[in-house]
Image (cartoon, rainbow, N blue to C red):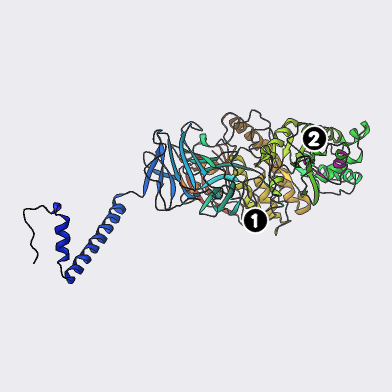
Amino acid sequence: SITMPLSRHTGQIPESNWTLTFREMTEPWKGTVGCFGVAVFFAMTIGIISWQALEQSPEEWVLRGRDGGMLWERRRGALVLRALPAGRAVAAIAVGGVPAAEPPPPRDHCWHDGRQFCYSWEEDAELRLSLEPPAAPGTECYGVRWTPLRPDVTLKDCFSMANVSWYGGPSIRAQRWPLNGAESPAQPFVSGDLGTNPDGFGPVLDRYFLGSTGVTVTVAPDVPLLLSLESHRHFCLETPAGRAEPLRYLLCISSDHLVPAQIATSPPPDWLFPPRRSPLWRYHGPEGSAAKIKRGLRSLVRRLKRHGLQEGVVALGERGTVILAAAERVPSERWKRQDLALVEPLQLSITLSPYASITSPLFLQSLHQGEAAGYWLSRQPRPGGSLIPVLTSWKGQLCARLNVTSEAALAWYLARARRLRQALGATYMIFEGVEGNSFLEQDVPPPAELAGDGYTRLLAAALATLGNGTVLSAGASSSHLPLFVQMSPLRSDWSHAGLKGLIPSVLHYSLLGYNFFIPDTVGGSLAGDSTGDPELFVRWLQIVTFLPVMAFGSPPWLCCDSWVLNLTRQCIQRHQDFVVPLLLKYSEEWQSLGHPIFRPAWWLSPTDPAAFTIEDEFLIGDEVLVAPITEKGQTWRDVFLPGEGHLWMDTNSARVFDGGTILRNYSASLAEVPVFVK
């Protein structure tokens, strides 16, 4: 047996005695003690892990403000933005590009500044969170800045769609409201032509996202950005690989959910011009020569007059405009008088673009004058070399594109546009091809001022000087300019790429500040499986009656019977008498407060989850609700009446209903569109 002095404290056992005694043990005893030690070690380890799991929160505060704060969630490596005092989660951001399993420790590299939190993942990236000045009254904002520490680190933050509906961002081919139902691979966040790249982003976008929890995400304008959308999971902000560029954005929350103060994405406009009272008729007649075009225009005008549609604007496409402009290089007074009378009593709209075919007289003349280097976008030359125009495809031709960074080129282009407008007697000018980045398309580094959507911004600012009869095919940070924006073409069918995508597009454009837009022509301008369908034409007509401009491609007498023709006249009259005064009223509110004219149902029901996903209704201001039919063959629908405590009157039947309710199976014959006045 082993005897030990009882008077000696076990913590003071001399090492020599302990080791001597252990050596005297028999082998079985040694094994028993060893196993016991291992068991104690494992028990202590499991206990510590259990204590951490039970006692330590899965989230850790890293930066707190007055109304909210940022937390780090250890389990999935995510930043969580919560609103105080209730701790309601308003955004969850999964972090990519850094080891997600490694949580930031409590140690804060910016501990001396209570308005910041900093942490570095060694050799990967640095995160800096900061409290920033509020973007609008009643909001609190947090700056997020990721800085890569190696060139091969790709920064990627993904915003969860779980329990959050997201709005804003890009326009897409089959527009969704909210964005949760959209799908897109990671691609540069740059405006594009959906006709040539249907899987890309459309012509109107903004680095601004609004969540139904009352959060906004605004990405810095100088950040090279990729965006991906994964349906009903998340959307991701990403930096290009190998560029070592920081990712910067601003998160803002409000004490309430969705508040009007958050909606204004750009300064309210300092201009105001009325929506177009008269419809727009697109010319699709012969374009073989100037003589044929003039005969076709006069024929269209005669038929419009014969059917009692003698008001409006006849829109001539780019090809027709080029042919008329080239018929006589220096128009005589006689030519001017003839063209001024081309479409009387209607007005004429012409179409231009910033492209010139390399075989066109316009481009060849600039070469002859030695101006090609300055007037057209060009690659940066090698030392001692000369500028070479960047060539791109436009409507099937190899073209050069106007250099919008050259004041001389812009002055030349604007002077030419004014001359054409005067020579052809045009009231309006439509500019196509404003969207896109020609350098990005060819994987050529652009000049700094043309990064991202710099081309669209610069050209829009220049074209705004032509007056309020100017229409652009794109918008990027240009909603404050006195310009109309042409919506993307839609298919002649009932899908989200056709009629169902019209109202989501209206809400998207208006949210981003583009309230004066020209929708695609009634019935859709792209071939679809319902081309020439009278029912589709009627349901489309009923929606555009309540928009700023009614545009027609195929006249109603070509697709439909006399009943549809009469309905078209009635809708045009309703647009002039009822809709235009309403749009003027809410244009003033847009000008003073920045609120959109066309509003979603949640504008009056900001805390009702049922309102967040309604994509087939829209409000004009706060007082008119339009709930059209967008399903083929349907003569009824459910109608959500927003605004608990409000009363809504059906303009067709004069019946009155409570707001905050849903009218089930509400009747809407082919001749009717449900419209309610508050």
Please tell me which residue lies in front, 289 or 116. 116
- Residue 437 is left or right of residue 291, and the answer is left
Viewer can see residue 601: yes
Q: CA distance from mark 1 to mark 2?
A: 40 Å
Q: Which residues are magenta?
A: 353-365
- Which residue in the structure is indicated by mark 2? 413
| Amino acid found under the numbered disc labelled 2 | Tyr
| Residue behind mark 1 | 494
Determine the image quadrant of residue 119: top left
Which of 192/328 is in front?
192
Q: Residues within 10 Å of mark 1 (few under 14, many from 20)?
A: many
Question: In the visual, does 667 lie left or right of 577?
Answer: left
Q: Nearer the viewer, residue 285 or 374?
A: 374
**Left or right of 555, for residue 609:** left
Graded by Cα atoms within 10 Å as few (under 14), some (14 to 19) or many (20 or more), the crowding at tag 2 reads some
Q: Residue at x 50, y 54 (%)?
A: 233
Q: Which mark is residue 557?
A: none
Question: Mark 1 belongs to which amino acid?
Answer: Trp
Depth order, front residue of 51/338: 51
The residue that appears at 26% across and 61% down in the rendered structure is 42
Residue drawn at (31%, 49%) of the image: 56
